Amino acid sequence: MLTDPPNANPPSQRTATERVYGNIYRAMIEHRLQPGAWLREEELAETFGVSRTVVRQALQRLAQDHLIELQHNRGARVAQPSLREAEHVFEARRVVECEVARRLGGSLDPEQLDALRRLVMAEAEADARGDHGAAVRISGEFHQALARMHGNPLFCRWLDGLLPTTSLLMVSFKTSGGPVCVAHRHAELLDALAHSSAAAAAEMRRHLKELERALTTDAARQPALRDVFAPYREAPDDHG
């Protein structure tokens, strides 16, 4: 179960461009891509078995979403959000997600609560087996699921754009150790959502504040692109 990028079609219907876009988006979500990493067209084309034209189209979309930077005569580079930008990102997330929690608190039906509970359990299991990428991805899916349950498509779209930037910030500035969202924090948030709107909004605010406070000035080494995208590599099913 992978976090889908914004406006993604079902996997069977994705074009080559959507597939490349989606894999780069997911690599950001899962902390596999470092901020500032160069995305070389030739290397990406070889990795995904597509043409450089397809890669170029995917990179243009990512640039439009402010997830990468296209530099003239130099190529594409993963965005490098600053600590100052982190303030803006988390302020925006609090505006959106605290309202989502407030609206959902005390009003979720048993089926919705079960769906959220399954995500919390899956995140905890991934964390327990040391699968950091899966734990981070499922954490994002938990937040996306809440936005979808709220029902405002603009909130969903905004959160889809904020999650990769959050991941890039965490790669650059998070203190060492532990996943982005700890599963037991989501369990506490789920308990609050089951009770009241006020409790849910307060717990979401506390949760996001905790994430923001975890930022520091650590940095990590960028691995080779062929290793970054190894989990997403598929047999080419498109012509580009």
Image (spheres, helix red, strand yellow):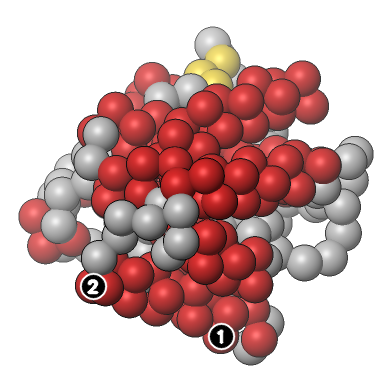
Q: Quadrant of the N terminus?
A: bottom left
- At 54% from the left and 33% from the top, the residue drawn is 93
Farthest left residue in view: 13
**Rendering quarter of residue 177:** bottom right
Query: As shown in the figure, which amino acid type bears the numbered disc 1?
Result: Glu
Mark 2 — residue? 111
Task: Residue 186 in the image: state x and y as whole percent.
Answer: 57, 64
Secondary element at image label 1:
helix
Residue 53 appears in the rendering: no
Image height of 34 relative to 11, above or below: above
- Residue 211 lies, in percent from the top left, at 72, 47
Q: Secondary structure at mark 2?
A: helix
Report the disc number at residue 125.
1
The residue lying toward the viewer, choosing from 106 and 181, is: 106
Which quadrant of the view contains residue 48? bottom left
Instruction: Pick whichever of labels 2 and 1 is earlier in the sequence.
Output: 2
Q: Is residue 177 above or below residue 69?
A: below
Lateral position of residue 91 relative to residue 16, left or right: right
Q: Nearer the viewer, mark 2 or mark 1?
A: 2
Q: Is residue 53 left or right of residue 195?
A: left
Quarter holding the C terminus is top left
Q: Position of residue 34 (x, y in %)?
A: 68, 45
Q: Is residue 234 above or below residue 49?
A: below
| Left-right relation of 46 to 203 | left
> What residue appears at the point 82 percent right and 42 percent down from the top-left corner?
213
> How crowded is the residue under tag 2: few (<14 C-alpha within 10 Å), some, or many (20+)?
few
Q: Crowding near pointer 1: few (<14 within 10 Å), some, many (20+)?
A: some
Residue at image location 53% in from the left, 60% down from the top? 192
Q: Amino acid at mark 2?
A: Glu
Residue 173, given in percent of the width and then of the height, sits at 81, 42
Q: Residue at x 52, y 67 (%)?
A: 191
